[in-house]
Amino acid sequence: MSGHDHDHHHDDHDHSELTETELRVRALETVLTEKGYVVPAALDAIVEAYETRIGPRNGAAVVAKAWTDPAFKKALLEDASKAVATLGHVSRVGDHLIAVENTPKTHNMVVCTLCSCYPWEMLGLPPVWYKAAPYRSRAVKDPRGVLADFGVTLPKDTDIRVWDSTAETRFLVLPMRPAGTEGWSEEQLAEIVTRDSMIGTGLPKAPGGAK
Amino acid sequence: MNGVHDMGGIDGFGKVEAEPNEPTFHETWEGRVIAMVRAIGTNGGINLDMQRFSREILPPQVYLTSSYYQKWFLALEQSMIARGMIGADEVEAGHSLHENPPLKRGTFTMKDVERVTTRGSFRREPRLAPAFAVGKRVRTKNINPVTHTRLPRYARGRSGTIERINGCHVFPDTNAREQGENPQWLYTVVFSGHDLWGDDADPTLQVSIEAFEPYLEPV
Amino acid sequence: MEHDRHDDHASELSDMQLRTRALETILLEKGYIEPAAIDVLIETYEKKIGPRNGAQVVAKAWVDSKFRQWLFEDGTAAIATLGFGGRSGNHLVALENTPAVHNMTVCTLCSCYPWAVLGLPPLWYKSAPYRSRAVADPRGVLKDFGVDLPKDTEIRVWDSTAELRYLVVPMRPAGTEGWSEEKLADLVTRDSMIGTGFPKNPGDAS
């Protein structure tokens, strides 16, 4: 069965320029297609969803709303899945989302020591560092050291709570709203909510425009 | 299993290195891999727990030196070969050479895309009341299964507190062995840094895990 | 291409060999070591220290009950009388295999081994499969060695985490009554003194 007419690979590398892994991946996809297991266009759609539709903007929108709407914030902290589901424009979540709130007393940080579990519907696919050995090994033992790698220093007496996502419950950190943002719209606020601040390895951007 | 994937507390891996403005996929093939894993997972009956275990059983040196999506790729290939869904010879040839029965849920097509780009639900109806209440002191069991578990080694045999009851969920330990969903109550159990790491631990540290009821015993 | 020309030889050496030679050259040029001293060390490891030492200890324990008792009470001292150990600094402890208890030694953390009586450890002893499995699944490990212990024999695994080193004293094979120590020593295999094997039987080919 020749399936090469619908070549979905947009790059036109010579075979010899492809890495071994790339060749093997293509080979597998060819086998799966020829067996009628998958339709390549459906795979394209998954890739596109991950690359464009599902990303940290979802989480940022939720955080911005929590900052401006006390009733929403309360609902979010009680049952994040339900609260987020009420926002039509945010991607659908499963029923396992838990929002954890940063306060002056407590800073939250999320990890998956065993693999890469992550609230991807809120933040998109996890970054390489989140899934790699240094973070997975050190977050549960030396979170301050990890924060130092991110250039973040917390006050000595701030408690740090690390959440190891060992099951299907997923955690979204609700960072503290920066000072100097009074009266900002949700859209403006969403702009300063960084992905790392929703994992707990960073803080939101300061209003002055500094990164 | 007590594999090298169980990394909590291991020393020597070095600094966390974040890439600024990291793309979703660094190479085209990475996107193809995650798409194939999702597609075959859902339509081919390889559940999430089986998928995770298939990565854990990669040889340690492969696990530690392969990139994330390389691990996903190798585990997918090997799972499918082990289940007779594709042949090693076909992988080598890059083409289908034999007939195979169709996937359990049929060919993965556009109609299936929405399902895999939305997180599923693993919550199930409880059959019994939860054994532990919020605030209860519990101890994690010293289990060392050679198959899949979600109780990391650093948190075995430790005393902690039930902070939250998260409903009844599919139990990965049995689901990964294709021995059924066997739903169990899921708890957030919190430990002090001292309980986990001893006298030299950061005194401001608390760590929690999501523990299934079979992992816990009363203190 | 086939014949081994001297000037081609260097290019055929492996990366590790080249790097080792380079380091040794530097150490020599800096006057840190003398080549003859290195040669003596290597010869000692290759020829002078080996499982034959341990085999002699075991054979003596099989025939001499007073030595045997002393060996289990104070391994370092008893073994020293045969000229082994001595300045090595390790304490040696002898472990007695009986019908009820089988002993097995490992170093999960690295490769600690009673080298004064057994020489340098074999590759498998120092490798991940043995180090990881011996303390969790010793029967599985013994199967890899083709050894099947009776179900009700207790297995005691000793993890050599400190400078104490262990020598397993296997049980004397039947049918060796009246044998000389030297002949008995021929039956004592290295693996039987680690606990991953048994001594040869009188009938076995050597």
Image (cartoon, coloured by chain):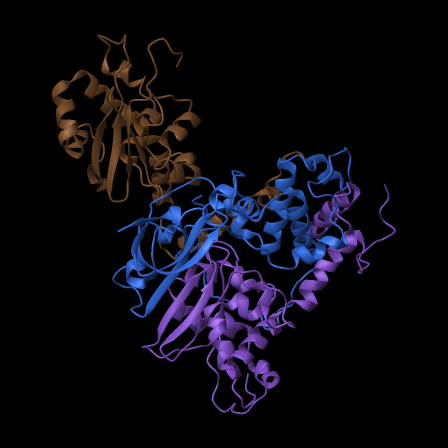
Chain colours: A purple, B blue, C brown
Quadrant for residue A92, please give it: bottom right
Quadrant for residue A86, please give it: bottom right
C191 to the left or right of A86:
left
A185 to the left or right of C19:
right
Q: What quarter of the picture does the N terminus of chain B occupy?
A: top left
Quadrant for residue A210, please give it: bottom right
Q: Residue, x 39% and y 71% (percent of image)?
A: A144
Residue A16 appears at what percent x and percent y? 77, 52
Residue B216 appears at what percent x and percent y? 35, 49
Q: Residue, x 48% and y 47% (percent of image)?
A: B183
- Determine whether C5 is above or below B203 in the image: above
- Determine whether C111 is above or below B125 in the image: above
Front-lying residue, C173 or B159: B159
Residue B150 visible in the displayed image: no
Front-lying residue, C151 or C82: C151
Residue C80 visible in the displayed image: yes
Q: How many marks?
A: 0
Residue A59 appears at what percent x and percent y? 57, 72
Residue B166 appears at what percent x and percent y? 44, 58
- Determine whether A165 is above or below C200 in the image: below
Front-lying residue, B27 or C14: B27
B120 to the left or right of C169:
right
